[in-house]
Image: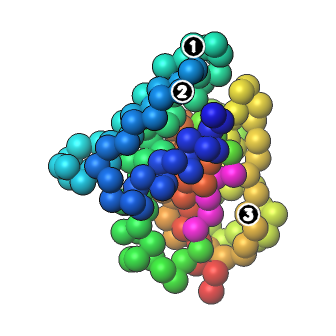
Amino acid sequence: MDIKEIQSLIKFVAKSGASEVKLETDDIKITIRTGTISSNEPTYVQQIPMAQSPMAHAVAPTLPEAAAPASPAVEAAEDDSKYITIKSPIIGTFYRKPSPDKPAFVEVGTTIGKGDVLCVIEAMKLFNDIESEVSGKIVKILVEDSSPVEFDQPLFLVDPS
C-alpha cells in the first residue's frame, strides 16, 4: 500500500462518518480514528512495518497530520471562499525562506504573479521551489515555517482580484 492509497483511505473514512476503521495486511496495519467520538480526540494512523522499515518510518510521522487539518480546512474554505487556495504538491518540510539568513519569499500582503516562488518544500534532502500558478495578493499563510506538510495540504490563500 503506497502513500496515495493511505491518503485516499483517510479521506474516505472522514467522509463516511465512521468513527474507527482498522485495516491489516501482511506487511501493514493501519487504524484510523475520526473525531466523531469526541471532538477533541485527534485522528491516528499507525503503520507497523514488516519488510520496508525505512520507507515506513519516513511516511508514518506525517500521516497523523494529514487527517488532523481536515475540519479546520473545511471551515477556512467556507470563510474564505472568494480566495484561491495554493496547496502543497508534495509531502515534505515547508520553508518560507530560501535559507535561514535570507528574507521570506512572500509575506501577507505580497502581490504575486504566475511563476513566482512562494516557498520551498524539502523532500528527501531535495529542496523544491513551489511556484504560484495564479496571480494575486497573499491573504493568509496557513503553515508555520519549518513544519511538515502533506500532499494537497493548503499552504496559502490568495486573493485573485
Q: Position of residue 41 (x, y in %)?
A: 23, 43
Q: Quadrant of residue 87?
A: bottom right
The residue wearing badge 3 is 132
Element carrying mark 1 = loop
The residue wearing badge 2 is 25
Q: Earlier in the sequence, mark 2 or mark 3?
A: 2
* Type of amino acid under label 3: Ser
* Residue drawn 70% across the image and 69% down it: 112
Badge 1: residue crowd in 10 Å (few <14, some 14–19, many ≥20): few
Q: Is residue 62 left or right of residue 37?
A: right
Front label number (2 vs 1): 2
Q: Earlier in the sequence, mark 2 or mark 1?
A: 2
Front label number (1 vs 3): 1
Please say whether residue 87 is one of the residues in the magenta stretch: yes
Q: Position of residue 28 (x, y in %)?
A: 53, 24
Please say whether residue 97 is one of the residues in the magenta stretch: no
Q: Quadrant of residue 115?
A: bottom right
Q: Quadrant of residue 121?
A: top right
Q: Tell me the chief SS of the magenta region.
A: strand
Element carrying mark 3 = loop
Element carrying mark 2 = loop
Front label number (2 vs 3): 2
Residue nearest the observer in this picture, 120 or 26 = 26
Badge 2: residue crowd in 10 Å (few <14, some 14–19, many ≥20): few
Real-space Cα distance between discs 2 and 1?
10 Å
* Residue drawn 18% across the image and 49% down it: 38
Real-space Cα distance between discs 2 and 3?
40 Å
* Type of amino acid under label 2: Thr
The residue wearing badge 1 is 50
Marks 1 and 3 in Cβ contact (< 8 Å): no
**Residue range corresponding to the magenta coloring:** 85-89
